[in-house]
Amino acid sequence: MTFFNSLREMFAMIELELRRLRHDRTEIYTRAVQPILWLTVYGTVMSHVRDIPTNGIPYIDYITPGVLLQSTIFVSVFYGLTIVWERETGILKRLLVAPASRYATVIGRAVASGVRAVVQALIIFPVAILLGVKFISNPTYIAAAFLMLFMISGGFAALSIFVASLMKTRERFMGIGQAMIMPLFFASNALYPIKLMPPILQSIAFFNPLTYAVDAVRGLMISGDVANIPADFLAVIVFDILIFAVASISFRKIIE
Amino acid sequence: MVLAIDVRQITKIYDGKIRALDGVDLEVNAADVFALLGPNGSGKTTLMRILTTQFRPTSGEAYSFGIDIIRNDAWVRKMIGYVPQETSVWTDISGFENLLIYSKIYGVPSSRRKKSISDALQIMGLEEMADGLVKKYSGGMVRRLEIACALLVKPKILFLDEPTIGLDPSARKAVWENLIFFKNEYGTTIFFNTHYMDEADLYSDHIAIIKRGKIVKSGTVNDLKHSLHSEVLLLDLKSHALDETALTDIRALDCVRDVVVSDSELRVFIDDADTALPKIMETLWRKGISIKKITTTRPTLDDVFLNYAGSITAVRKHSPQNAKGAPAWD
């Protein structure tokens, strides 16, 4: 019974997110600008640098999964802002008084953010095709890549909710959010292979869940090399479970 | 009869030092409208948040319809509705969508969802604006929508934290008329915090005044007003000749505390005008004194509030006896 209640609340949260998107799509479009600039400006310039070993993949194609993920992760990492805003209004108090578990609230919100991220990626995807990025034409692979996008975005949204429950105010949260996004992106294989990094950065990249997500999405969408896919998915699942648990436990702190 | 809310010796200490609640005892009857009055920072919101299971008290017990609020919080959450002081609806979706999302969160079965939502909209008078975005609503409409969200499950107790703060008088009236309509329809107990005395006076059955984490006075509105012992009867007499014996007779009455005469005006200080007036009139009648006009001055709830809750600085500096909760002019 409780399980079904929780499931129902999770779906309600996803529905909420989709309804908000439907009323105001501007955010989705404006957020698409930055990743498109990454591909068109940064990608084009850097593709002239022949020193980055991409296994023969054109550089723009190589960074497309990273840029797709970066744009969705950005949505997730700042999802906590919504929670901070809901804390300042009375919404969180009210959700905590509703007959639903806080696990369902946290997971529901995180999953909802994952859905938002997928919508975001769906906007950038056709733009990348127009830019000449060659995707693997296997629909199962592409679907699996979007599943990975969804899973990692949900995980980072949960991380963001966890940070929000500790920081509690917009200003503090913004500081942490900004500080998180840079190392996340650069200490991963989003823009260059890990073997190019200094050893310290390599070990950070090893613990960075984004590395596994990029590896999976790149394998599924661009290179077609799927040898690491099960390991990548396993890594992200472990990350999701851990962070969902941590975020759920600390969630109640946010209203205190 | 089972009490809707039964609070026993609730204490809440924040961070090991700030004593927000200090041994609160409180009883609320089922189907009552109960107002908790208190100055800012007196512990009203803390008490409400404990009663709505948002956090636990440091010590003490609380029951709702016999169910332990602290230990069986999940059970209690199923039967209460709660509207916090701050905005608690999403402003970037429509009013109807807010109700839809909340009905799913509260677990209203899909077969009854449509009916619950249209009932809630109708009770709160929001049918016409249901499809508009909430950010375009006026303050009063937002508040009515928030209450509507709480009514979806037909709660046994509805908790409202400062339900009409910041609303104009007509919006306040609309909120209350809709609330009272709902209460009469479903017999819901309403527990609200406020510092609008007129609302407590008009709409509540019982009142408690909280001050610095303690309940300093509780009872019906009339009980509280009478407790000040400060009703005044102003009798305008027809003749100037008020003989001394009449005055002595009135002074001798049990219910009379003091009498002051000036010309043809008789000022009688009493506890309760309703019971004292007939006796005084009878005394005057017997002496053959006829009355031109009678004016009764009763303390307002503002007087009650100022007397018991006082202003915190004034209490400390000027009238120490007030701190014990005794009327200043006793």
Image (cartoon, rainbow, N blue to C red):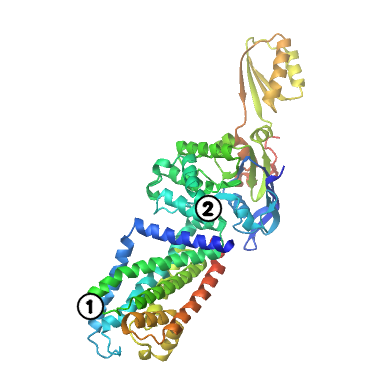
* Position of residue B9 measured from the top left corner of the image (x, y, whole percent): 71, 52
Identity, as a three-letter code, of the amino acid under mark 1: Gly
Disc 2 crowd rating (10 Å Cα; few below 14, some 14-19, many 20+) is few
| Callout 1: SS | loop
Residue B59 visible, this angle: yes
Residue at x 56%, y 62% (from the top left corner)? A101
* Position of residue A251 measured from the top left corner of the image (x, y, whole percent): 54, 65
Q: Nearer the viewer, residue B304 or A68?
A: A68
Which mark, residue B268? none
Q: Nearer the viewer, residue A60 or A151?
A: A151
| Callout 2: SS | loop
* Position of residue B73 measured from the top left corner of the image (x, y, whole percent): 64, 57
Identity, as a three-letter code, of the amino acid under mark 2: Pro
Residue at x 38%, y 49% (from the top left corner)? B133
Report in which chain the residue with disc 2 lies. B
| Horizontal side, residue B163 vs residue B218: left or right | left
Question: Which quadrant: the C terminus of chain B?
Answer: top right
Disc 1 crowd rating (10 Å Cα; few below 14, some 14-19, many 20+) is few
Q: Nearer the viewer, residue A64 or B34?
A: A64
Query: Could you tell me how far apart the alpha carbons at marks 1 and 2 are, in whole angstroms?
Result: 49 Å
Question: Which quadrant: the N terminus of chain B?
Answer: top right
Give the residue pinned by disc 2. Answer: B109
Above/below status of B116 relative to A131: above
Which mark, residue A132? 1
The quarter of the picture where residue A201 lies is: bottom left
Above/below status of B21 relative to A81: above
The quarter of the picture where residue A6 lies is: bottom right
Q: Nearer the viewer, residue B177 or A182?
A: B177
